Amino acid sequence: GAGVSQSPSNKVTEKGKDVELRCDPISGHTALYWYRQSLGQGLEFLIYFQGNSAPDKSGLPSDRFSAERTGGSVSTLTIQRTQQEDSAVYLCASSFRDTEAFFGQGTRLTVV
Amino acid sequence: GDSVTQMEGPVTLSEEACLTINCTYTATGYPSLFWYVQYPGEGLQLLLKATKADDKGSNKGFEATYRKETTSFHLEKGSVQVSDSAVYFCALSRGSSNTGKLIFGQGTTLQVKP
């Protein structure tokens, strides 16, 4: 596809369950980012992958959050033992090295 | 730590009115500054950017000037249209690299009425 693709677009899960959110970046983009957008906290940086370098995990809010990027392309954000405060829109972005970041439309996660 | 502060919304204007959305930042070093826009039902899009002091970013009639002395990057447009209704986010990144690792302001909702 032409843009950053995220799936699912909406996810409702029960408190305590694990969830996986997927991001397909723009083909050829070397950098990939995850952000969280919530009413109380605005847009928060979570994690950043650049090529084969070790990811920058400085924004992950707790050890329940993890992310991986396989083959330098698709990324999965995993939230274990979800809590209600994890409810938010999770945004993925990609860029070619240090140029403009393009954002996907996000996954809206609701923890009930 | 680094931070971005935007004026609170919502901002409601009539078509053809002038727009200013204030943005100030706190950062060490020399950050790059950005305005992103989120139209209803769409993803975030880069509107404009400036990478050094006194640079002016412009796009679609919007402008913002990087003011280091006042640590500001206010967004302006001389004549808004209904199609400009959206949420606007001011953001910074550290230096010229990692331009996707951004610190965002809280966002300002703009409503333009015909």
Image (cartoon, coloured by chain):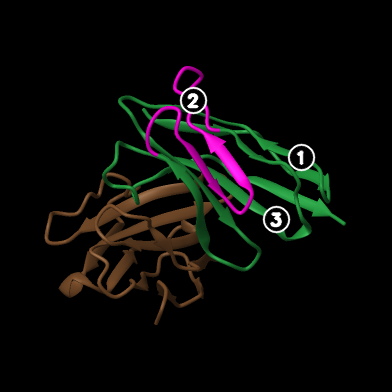
Q: Secondary structure at mark 1?
A: loop
- Chain designation of label 3: B
Asked if residue A26 can be seen in this view, the reply is: yes
Q: Residue at 51%, 19% (x, y): give it.
A: B70
B108 up-or-down from A4: above or below: above
Neighbour tally class for label 3: few under 14, some 14-19, many 20 plus, Cα within 10 Å = some
Residues B60 and B69: in front is B60
Write down which chain is painted green: B
**SS category of the residue bearing label 3:** helix
- Span colored in magenta: B51-73
* Residue furthest to the bottom: A1
The x, y position of residue B89, in whole percent, is 55, 46
B60 or A15, which lies in front?
A: B60
Q: Which chain is brown?
A: A
Q: Is residue A85 visible?
A: no
Whether the magenta-drawn stretch holds residue B68 is answered as yes
Q: Residue at x 22, y 66 (%)?
A: A68
Q: Quadrant of the C terminus of chain A?
A: bottom right
**Residue under numbered circle 1:** B18
Coordinates of residue A74 in the picture (x, y in percent): 27, 74
| Magenta span main SS | loop
Q: Earlier in the sequence, mark 3 or mark 1?
A: 1
Judging by the rendered image, the residue that carries numbered circle 2 is B67
Q: Nearer the viewer, residue B56 or B86?
A: B56
What kind of residue is marked 1?
Cys
Image mark 2: chain: B
Are the residues at dot 1 and dot 2 in contact (C-beta closer than 8 Å)? no
Q: Residue at x 27, y 61 (%)?
A: A96
